[in-house]
Image (cartoon, rainbow, N blue to C red):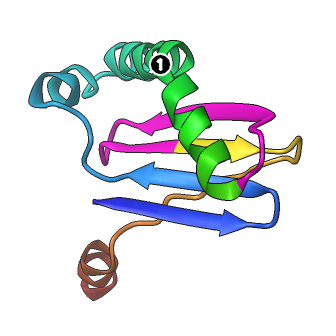
Amino acid sequence: AVSVVLSGDTLVITVHGALTPAEQALARTPAGAAQVQEFHRKLFASSSEPLRQEIKRITGRNVREAIAEVEPATGAIVHAFTSGTMVEVFLLTSESAQNESTAI
């Protein structure tokens, strides 16, 4: 699943459940999670140009900054494209997980 939010000068794309089974297994340890995060940051840095061009085509605006963040526990990957503003991303637990934890 993919979520896209455009607000002002910031575009945030979240790809849910994007990690492979091998990446999920590796991410079970802190060192492995760091390795998965670093891999996806490098992958994004080296391959985001076509996405930047598509954003320019759709919005008519250039991308000034772009970052990628991986949440190994959930497999979510967040791509943020900004115009120089600070972006803080908070990934929340699912409603079903929240209901389970409050019922205990």
Of residue 99 and residue 3, the one placed in the foreground of this image is: 3
Residue type, mark 1 in image = Ser
Whether 70 is among the magenta residues is: yes
Which residue occupies 16% across, 30% down? 20
Which residue occupies 60% across, 55% down? 58
Indicate the position of residue 60 as horizontal and vertical percent values: 73, 52
Kindly state the secondary structure of the residue where label 1 is placed. Answer: helix
Looking at the rendering, which quadrant does residue 102 occupy?
bottom left
Which residue occupies 27% across, 60% down? 1
Which residues are the magenta region? 60-78
Looking at the rendering, which quadrant does residue 68 occupy?
top right
Q: Crowdedness of circle 1 by 10 Å Cα count: few (<14), some, many (20+)?
A: few
Indicate the position of residue 104 as horizontal and vertical percent values: 25, 81
Residue farthest right in this picture: 84
Of residue 44 and residue 101, the one placed in the foreground of this image is: 44
Please name the residue that numbered disc 1 is placed on. Answer: 47
Depicted 63 relative to depicted 16: above or below: above
Which residue occupies 65% across, 65% down? 6
Looking at the rendering, which quadrant does residue 75 occupy?
top left
Depicted 94 relative to depicted 50: above or below: below
Of residue 87 and residue 43, the one placed in the foreground of this image is: 43
Whether 82 is among the magenta residues is: no
- The tally of labels here is 1
Residue farthest left in this picture: 21
Task: Using residue 74 as the reference point, say whether residue 48 is left or right of it.
Answer: right
Task: Using residue 15 as the reference point, say whether residue 54 is left or right of it.
Answer: right
Indicate the position of residue 64 as horizontal and vertical percent values: 81, 34
Task: Using residue 74 as the reference point, say whether residue 47 is left or right of it.
Answer: right
